[in-house]
Amino acid sequence: MTLQVLKHGLDGTDAEIIRALTDNARMSMRDLAERVGMSAPSVTERVRRLEEAGIIRGYTLDIDMRALGYPLQAIVRIRPLPGQMHVVERMIEAIPEFVECDKVTGEDCFVARLCLQKIEDLDDILSGILERAMTNSAIIKATAIDRRMPPL
């Protein structure tokens, strides 16, 4: 177990619950209990405690962007011009094609993921930002590792 797991007071059963829910967040408490070898009421209580501790923050959907008509994705590094950071951040928030954005250290202030219906949309989407920031884009060819849990 990692130091962070120990710090939060998690044990092996908690880690197994988290792994199971990461695999299938819609798993019933009965199925989850069976997977970790506990009763449904006991596992329900553990899940409630993990939620209250803020370890489980929510349950999400895994959406296939291609099926929604967005066959392309891009990673965009964004470096606001001096004095424009908050303006650029609000601009990114207002563009629905940006599906993720992280503030980062280094020369670029933001690293964002953008969904595109066609490659020609990239310039149109970024045009407003280019007045207030420099960008560097890379089209995603494939995802080598899907988002996953760190070791527990």
Image (tube, rainbow, N blue to C red):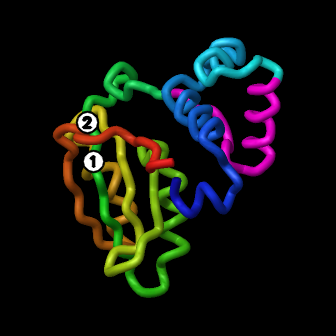
The answer to which of 34 and 89 lies nearer the viewer is 34
The residue beneath circle 2 is: 72
Q: Position of residue 24 (x, y in %)?
A: 53, 23
Instruction: Indicate the secondary structure of the residue bearing disc 2.
Output: strand
Q: Position of residue 44 (x, y in %)?
A: 78, 26
User: Magenta residues, as a range?
Assistant: 42-61
At a point 38% along the width and 56% down the height, the residue shown is 112
Q: Amino acid at mark 2?
A: Leu
Q: Given the current orientation, which residue lies at the most extreme left position?
A: 141
The answer to which of 136 and 25 lies nearer the viewer is 25
To which quarter of the image does residue 15 belong?
A: top right
Mark 2 burial class by Cα count in 10 Å: few <14, some 14-19, many 20+: some
The residue beneath circle 1 is: 74
Q: Position of residue 148 (x, y in %)?
A: 42, 42
To which quarter of the image does residue 65 belong?
A: top left
At a point 51% along the width and 66% down the height, the residue shown is 89
At a point 39% along the width and 76% down the height, the residue shown is 80
